Amino acid sequence: QEKLVESGGGLVQNGDSLRLSCVASGFTFPFSSYTMGWFRRAAPGAEHEFLGQIGSDLIYADSVKGRFTISRDNAKNTVYLQMTGLKPEDTAVYYCTAKRGRPNFNFWGQGTQVTVSS
């Protein structure tokens, strides 16, 4: 059974950096063949905001371009989200996602909370 587990969230201060990790397991095809994405949701019921993805290309949302970096280690089945210059408005639950050969991300982790204090 496919599983994505995020870690690395926590409480940080304005301007701090934080790195989130996401480990994948149980996928049918090699991890390297999946496009991995990061989303966040600022509050329950709010929409999930796309942050970026890494696969055959690397794409970032304008809201985080230049501050957030996505990378992956296929040998470890892990994708990372390096966040710098964090702001209170970055406070959200951050989700790791995966897709393969389809337009929408269909695998989601449980999320990890990031809180940025002012």
Image: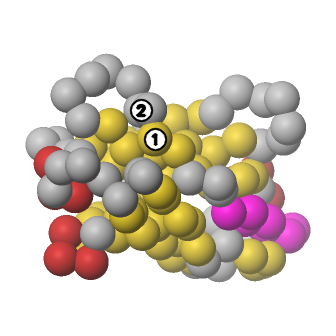
- Give residue 9's quadrant in the image: bottom right
Relative to residue 12, is residue 96 depicted above or below?
above
Residue occupying the far top of the picture: 103
Total marks in image? 2
**What is the three-letter code of the residue carrying label 1?**
Phe
Secondary structure that dominates the magenta span: strand
Q: Which residue is mark 2?
A: 105
Say which residue appears at 18% left-offset and 76% top-offset.
75
Labelled disc at residue 107: 1
Q: Is 52 in front, or is 67?
A: 52
Residue 88: say if magenta: no
**What is the three-letter code of the residue carrying label 2?**
Phe
Say which residue appears at 16% left-offset and 56% top-offset.
30
Horizontal side of residue 82 vs 26, given as left or right: right
For the question of whether residue 85 can be seen, the reply is no
Residue occupying the far front of the picture: 1
Pointers 2 and 1 in contact (CB under 8 A)? yes
Q: Which residues are magenta?
A: 112-118
Residue 114: say if magenta: yes
For the question of whether residue 24 can be seen, the reply is yes
Residue 111 at what x, y percent from top left? 65, 56
Q: Secondary structure at mark 2?
A: loop
Residue 80 at what x, y percent from top left? 40, 68
Residue 16 at what x, y percent from top left? 65, 78
